[in-house]
Amino acid sequence: MITFQQREWGSLVVDLSDRFAVSTWSLHRALGATYPYKPGDRAYPARQSTYGKGTIELIDVPQQCADHSIFRLEICSFHLPSLLPSYLRDFRKATEEAGVKLQTLLVEDGDLSNSQTAHRDAEWMEGWIDVAAALGAENMRVIAGKARPTDPALMLAETHLRRLAELTAAAGVRLVIENWFDLLPGPTEVNRILDALHGKVGLNGDFGNWERAGKYEDLAKIMGRAELCHAKGRYSAAGLDEEDYVRCIELSNLAGYQGPFTLIYDSAYHQDEWSGILEERDCIARVFGEKFANDDHYRCISRGATHGNCARILDVKLDTRAIHQCKS
């Protein structure tokens, strides 16, 4: 449950419903199966019980999201059991009926920085553009590269990303990259690619990919440019490391990040993956609550509403709306 702060002055309802998403990776145990699509392999991948038998099918996920008041979804490419037009239509219908936006198709393989395979992998990634468009995805995330960040490797990736960005834009999909793998080990390399592509490619910033010294300082140097965010919580035997998580959220806010936080739960701490997902969501909502409560310049968007009315609005959204008080 979200903790709601109250003050003596009129009421403020803050709608956070569009600030949260969930990735199918956060439900990989519930889904169980994967379908390992690979560059250079045109064979249709067989279902693999990578994470067990699973308890749900991918097409069930949009309604599960809505039932938990999360209305944005990201799909890992290896979770798609079929790329047939009929299945893609059925899945898109499921998202529309649930009122869930398909935020991103995550293309989970390929390397645009390897001179031996970059052309092949770029063509393979092109094939996912039609899939993203058919699903109604707003974005398609690709892996920029896995090679060491030499000048030739970065330039090769930039060349292929430029072409991919043109093709995705023509299909009505935004191409994004992520601070992930060896090509993008720090903000210098991330910002170089973004600068070289002049806004044609966006950034998905991930909290969990730079687990090393200098993590917070380096994230602060890219999150102001991010359009999306993988908000991955760090778990141990003691549970969620709230100090780390809150620091990542706060540095993102200070950098000017205004996009959704995609809740990445990747731990066995909670047997039920939704428990971990919602724990992360509620932690972020508390950060927003403290921000709004302490911001004297934040204007009330709902003056004069009673606490009871605000509570009823909240109940409809299953705690994705935060109640705070603000000077009238």
Image: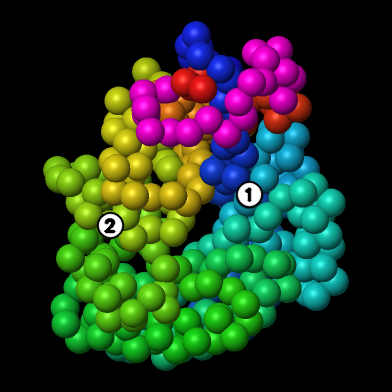
Q: Residue at x 60, y 58 (%)?
A: 103
Residue 3 in sight = no
Residue 303 is a magenta residue: yes
**Mark 2 = which residue?**
222
Residue 228 placement (x, y as % from top left): 46, 55
Residue 43 placement (x, y as % from top left): 65, 79
**Mark 1 = which residue?**
72
Residue 4 placement (x, y as % from top left): 53, 16
Instruction: Assign the N terminus to one quadrant of the image.
Output: top right
Q: Residue at x 48, y 33 (%)?
A: 299
| Front residue of this view, candidates 38 and 209 | 209
| Front residue of this view, candidates 169 and 295 | 295
Q: Are marks 2 and 1 in contact (CB under 8 Å)?
A: no
State left or right for residue 236 relative to residue 107: left
Q: Residue at x 70, y 30 (%)?
A: 317
CA distance for labels 2 and 1? 23 Å
Residue neighbourhood size for the residue with mark 2, other residues' Cα within 10 Å, grouped as few (<14), some (14–19), many (≥20): many
Quarter where residue 155 is shown: bottom left
Q: Amino acid at mark 1?
A: Arg
Quarter where residue 157 is shown: bottom left
Residue neighbourhood size for the residue with mark 1, other residues' Cα within 10 Å, grouped as few (<14), some (14–19), many (≥20): many
Q: Amino acid at mark 2?
A: Ile
State whether the magenta stretch is mostly helix, strand or loop.
loop
**Number of numbered callouts drawn:** 2
Residue 105 placement (x, y as % from top left): 58, 64
Q: Secondary structure at mark 1?
A: strand
Numbered range of the magenta stretch = 293-313
